[in-house]
Image (tube, rainbow, N blue to C red):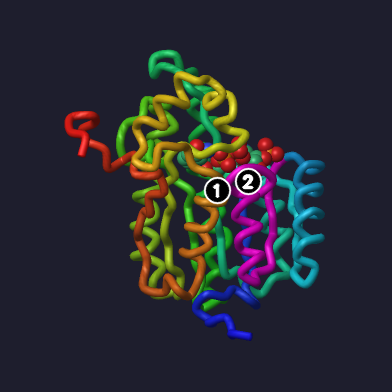
Amino acid sequence: MTEMSPRWNLTGKTALITGASKGIGLATASSLLALGADVIMVARGKEELQRQAAELQKTHSERKVISLAADVSSREGLSKIEDGTASFEKIDILVNNAGTNIRKKTSEFTSEDIKFLLDTNLLSAFELSRILHGKMKASKSASLVFVSSIAGIGSVLTGSVYAMTKAALNQLTRSLAHEWAKDGIRVNAVAPGFIRTPLTGALMARPEVNNLLDSRTFLKRVGEAEEVADAIAFLALPAASYMTGQVLVVDGGMTCLTAQGLLDI
Ligand SMILES: NC(=O)c1ccc[n+]([C@@H]2O[C@H](COP(=O)([O-])OP(=O)(O)OC[C@H]3O[C@@H](n4cnc5c(N)ncnc54)[C@H](OP(=O)(O)O)[C@@H]3O)[C@@H](O)[C@H]2O)c1
């Protein structure tokens, strides 16, 4: 039997993933478990979270799968995570994935909408990174990954507030990579394109949207949650030990497209 290189293995590591009961977060929990990590899964809905955690525990019986129901956009939720991780000496991997969107024209956003999106997508990730900084430092080789979006790099007209939160995460990635390198913490982001998850299900069910997305993507299809999860897992691995401050785009080529249909070669 060939032995797995320690550079492609997460045995002995503990990962905390927010938004882990569905979509990209759930797929990330699965990818990290498969590489040998123990996982702490966070989401608001307790029942669904516990159901998904129990499923993953069944397939990874030798790993620890912990569920922690908390709302990362609230002070109480963040305190719950702080208390729930107090007994851990270290956290090796933090995936700030929880996020959502409200698709509206800019002039139609209420101040409640704006606060909700800033709290859920941006401030949650900023605050949780600060809360767990000491535990990541204790790891001596931690990996912090933000789940951003191509909407934070170019315009995809999916709502300006969402785009603003994701662009801010990209800058936070570079700032923390610089500031926390001395603490042994690598900081990167993954910027997915259009991925099939509960968040995008209704949008992608519209044939005109699906066709448009296919035609604007080199790979001629939308992405699947595990295709983003595996990019996150790569950034978490010792194999990515020289990568920090990067925003890794996982979009089937969408952001490379500058001219379409001019030539057919
Ligand atoms: N899908 C895409 O095409 C796409 C593209 C680019 C970027 N992204 C980003 O990828 C991330 C995951 O998206 P997804 O498509 O997988 O979304 P999803 O299918 O809607 O899943 C979101 C997860 O986050 C949890 N969550 C939402 N708000 C939360 C909160 N305040 N506190 C704790 N957990 C919360 C949800 O569970 P509860 O509701 O039970 O809390 C769920 O587990 C987001 O940051 C999104 O912006 C997605």
Magenta residues, start to end: 20-44
Query: Which residue position is annotated with label 2?
Result: 19
**Tag 1 near tag 2, CB within 8 Å:** yes
Task: Please indicate, yes or no, whether residue 74 appears anywhere in the rendered image.
Answer: no
Question: Which x, y percent locates residue 182?
Answer: 39, 75
**Mark 1 sits near ligand 1, with its Cβ under 8 Å away:** yes
User: What mark, if any, has residue 182 been given in the picture?
Assistant: none
**Mark 2 sits near ligand 1, with its Cβ under 8 Å away:** yes
| Residue 21, magenta (yes or no) | yes
Q: Under tag 2, what secondary structure?
A: loop
Q: Quadrant of ligand 1?
A: top right
Task: Please indicate, yes or no, whether residue 23 appears anywhere in the rendered image.
Answer: yes
Where's the N terminus, which quadrant? bottom right
- Of residues 37 and 123, the one nearer the viewer is 37
Kind of residue at disc 2: Gly
- The answer to whether residue 90 is above or below residue 111 is below
Kind of residue at disc 1: Asn
Going 55% across and 31% down the picture, which residue do you hit? 200
Query: Which residue position is annotated with label 1?
Result: 97
Question: Which x, y percent locates residue 41?
Answer: 69, 54
Mark 1 or mark 2, earlier in chain: 2
**In the rendered view, does 216 fall on the left or right side of 65?**
left
